[in-house]
Image (spheres, rainbow, N blue to C red):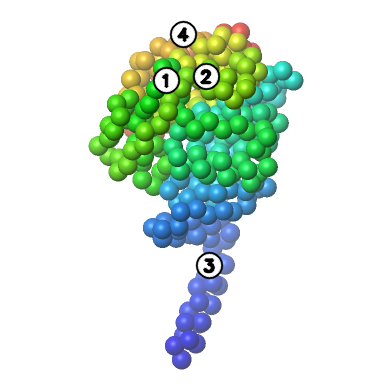
Amino acid sequence: MADLLRDARTTLLLRALELLGKRRRRVLGWRALAGTGVADITFESQGLSWTASPDDGPVGFALFVDGAYHGAELAALCSWMAHGGVVSATRDVVVDVGAHIGSTCIPLARATGCRVLAIEPVAASFRRLTANVAQNALAERIRLAHAAVRRQGGRVTMSLVPGASGSSFVSGTEPGRRAPDALQVEEVDARPLGDLLAAAGFRPEEVALVWADVQGCEAEVIASGTALWARGVPLWAEIEPRSLRQQGGVAEFVRRAGEHFDRFIEAQDLVRHGAAARPVPIAALTALIESIGPELNRDALFLPPGRQPG
């Protein structure tokens, strides 16, 4: 009798799940993994294979549920690159700083045919990044660097954010420094962007685009990539005021951006208007940052002088 009741309950549960639709079932499936102790899950979606973890937070969730993270932004960026002739036979390298588990560099490599330098400092994320590159047969085109990007090399302390590995951040340059809200820290190598490019066998003149999602360290990326911006390389960067304040301040980011870029296109405008999106002067960056609410962020495409809008 107990077995019959269990089987009946299972049948009713499965029928109820079928009524929810595929996406809602995927949402429930991903949420059910949280707290189970499952470290990794490998799945296929939209022609790509992913190894992710419940600890990957919104990135893993989006890949599992929707098959892409920043999918609309990536599609718009690829369209802009194609329209503007950003990629050429001699300029075909994309640099992904803060690559996490590959949710940006793998779709970009597939969509553009570019070679990639993917840079990720956190050990667990780098392990999944390596797995994802390999299982999508991209190891020959995506070169990996286990490091953080800083204008001065050395060692930095990464604070790991539980349940959101993609939000891990640099908490200091002093060994062993612990951020108040971090349960764990890692000591990682930090190197200038030019050094990492050279170690991977890439030259600055081969770089077509830099993508940076580095939790407030965007000013460091800008300061470290001066040779690229001087060659007209655009920078896609996340703008998160809270993280910027933790990493040297908003004013420092605005100053660095103003030194090397003269215009930018907000991601939402690029998604909405595609190649027809018009840049705004870099002087408008402060107003944009002030308009971003607490705990929120926006992405923007920064254009050096001389780089055509698309």
The amino acid type of the residue labelled 3 equals Leu
Asked if marks 3 and 4 touch (Cβ < 8 Å), the reply is no
Query: Which residue was labeled with disc 2?
Result: 195
Residue 102, percent across and down? Answer: 56, 38
Q: Residue furthest bottom?
A: 1
- The CA span between labels 2 and 1 is 9 Å
- Residue 206 vs residue 118: left or right? right
Any part of residue 213 in sight: no
Mark 1, mark 4: which one is toward the viewer?
1
- The CA span between labels 3 and 4 is 55 Å
Label 2 element class: helix
Disc assigned to residue 153: 1
Question: Mark 3 vs mark 1: which is more N-terminal?
Answer: 3
Asked if marks 2 and 1 touch (Cβ < 8 Å), the reply is yes
Mark 3, mark 4: which one is toward the viewer?
4
Residue 266, percent across and down? Answer: 52, 24
Image quarter where the C terminus lies is top right
Residue ID at (56%, 14%): 228
Question: Mark 2 vs mark 3: which is more N-terminal?
Answer: 3
Any part of residue 26 in sight: yes
- Residue 201 vs residue 262: left or right? right
Label 1 element class: loop
Query: Which residue was labeled with disc 4?
Result: 259
Question: Mark 3 vs mark 4: which is more N-terminal?
Answer: 3
Query: Which residue was labeled with disc 3?
Result: 17
